[in-house]
Image (cartoon, rainbow, N blue to C red):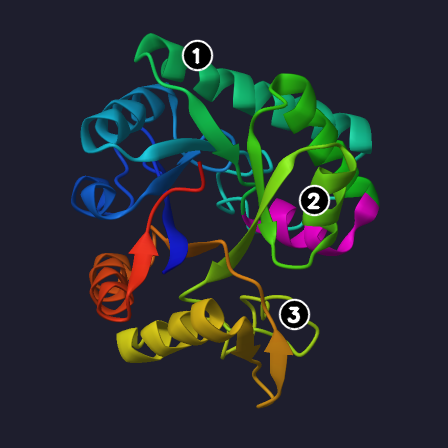
């Protein structure tokens, strides 16, 4: 039986501003990427999300991003490897504190937004991230875009890595995600999302926006929690993956 982890970016509310449907989505996923206060989230939201994850048996991961609340961490920022190392290490430590408070073991780290996409093609950035993860806790799994510089850096630093694929994003012929500035970047139809995920999980390929079929290894599938159709996507993915005899289980 094939196995896949189903993850979602959650804990992205901030103060009085509510983002996503965390309470409804969390019972349906196996791993959760918790915003650490830089691109989204705050100390109260982090504490609540870790507590909810514990209650529902979902594995917990840090979701560090650029310090960019206004842009939700999706705007590229040029900075130094030292800065990247320090802010990734800092954010992992912040979430680790709440994990200890609730007697939970953190499973993974998944960079967010522009940091994730830039590191996918930039070996210097990816190595700064991988080193921060290793120095924070060498037992953490590093989530990265399948076949990216980020997963390569994780392997170089001796980390367990997981190839992440996306249910709600389209792909370029080189295997990168279509930039959000493009009209066809997002998948909003749940049937299209399901078919893309089934293709990636069962054949280790994906159909790019130009119609070409490219290799795409899948260890974990992401649904963005701030997406308009996130809850529907997660429900439909669980239903169809189970129907196709694919086990839904966390990485560890």
Magenta highlight on residue 115: yes
Q: Label 1: which residue?
A: 97
The main secondary structure of the magenta stretch is helix
Instruction: Give the mark nearest the N terminus, 3 or 2.
Output: 2
- Residue 236 vs residue 226, the one in the foreground: 236
Q: Which sits in the foreground, 148 or 240? A: 240
Residue shown at 36% from the left, 41% from the top: 31
Instruction: Check the image and name the residue furthest to the left.
Output: 24
- Residue at the farthest front position: 1
Q: Residue at x 25, y 32 (%)?
A: 57
Q: Residue at x 79, y 26 (%)?
A: 82
Q: Quadrant of the N terminus?
A: bottom left
- 29 is higher (above) or lower (below) than 63: below
For the residues carrying marks 3 and 2, which lies nearer the camera in this image?
A: 3
Q: Residue at x 35, y 18 (%)?
A: 104
Q: Which residue is mark 2?
A: 77
Left or right: 87, with 41 as reference point: right
**Which residues are the magenta region?**
113-123
Task: Give the vertical position of 206 relative to 21 (above or below).
Answer: below
Task: Look at the image and say whether residue 130 sits in the magenta stretch.
Answer: no
| Residue corresponding to mark 3 | 175
**Which of the two discs, 1 and 3, labels the residue nearer the N terminus?**
1
Q: Taking 97 as reference, is 82 left or right?
A: right
Q: Nearer the viewer, residue 18 or 221?
A: 221
Labels 1 and 3 touching (C-beta < 8 A): no
Between the residue at mark 3 and the residue at mark 2, the CA separation in whole angstroms equals 22 Å
């Amino acid at each position: 039986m094939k196995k896949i982890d189903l993850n979602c970016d959650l804990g992205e509310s901030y103060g009085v501003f509510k983002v996503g449907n965390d309470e409804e989505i969390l019972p349906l996923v196996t791993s959760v990427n918790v915003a650490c206060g830089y691109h989204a989230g705050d100390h109260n939201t982090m504490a609540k999300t870790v507590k909810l994850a514990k209650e529902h048996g979902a594995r917990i991961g840090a979701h560090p991003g650029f310090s960019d609340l206004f842009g939700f961490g999706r705007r590229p920022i040029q900075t130094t490897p030292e800065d990247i190392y320090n802010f990734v290490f800092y954010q992992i430590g912040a979430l680790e504190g709440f994990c200890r408070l609730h007697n939970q073991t953190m499973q993974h780290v998944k960079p967010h937004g522009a940091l994730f996409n830039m590191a996918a093609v930039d070996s210097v950035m990816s190595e700064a991230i991988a080193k921060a993860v290793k120095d924070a806790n060498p037992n953490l799994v590093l989530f990265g875009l399948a076949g990216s510089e980020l997963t390569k850096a994780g392997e170089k630093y001796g980390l367990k890595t997981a190839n992440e694929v996306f249910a709600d994003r389209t792909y370029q012929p080189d295997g990168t995600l279509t930039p959000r500035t493009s009209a066809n970047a997002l998948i909003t139809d749940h049937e299209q999302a399901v078919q893309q995920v089934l293709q990636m999980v069962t054949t280790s390929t994906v159909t790019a926006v130009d119609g070409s079929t490219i290799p795409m290894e899948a260890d974990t599938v992401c649904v963005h929690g701030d997406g308009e159709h996130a809850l529907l996507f997660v429900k439909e993915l669980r239903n169809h993956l189970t129907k196709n005899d694919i086990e839904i289980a966390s990485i560890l």
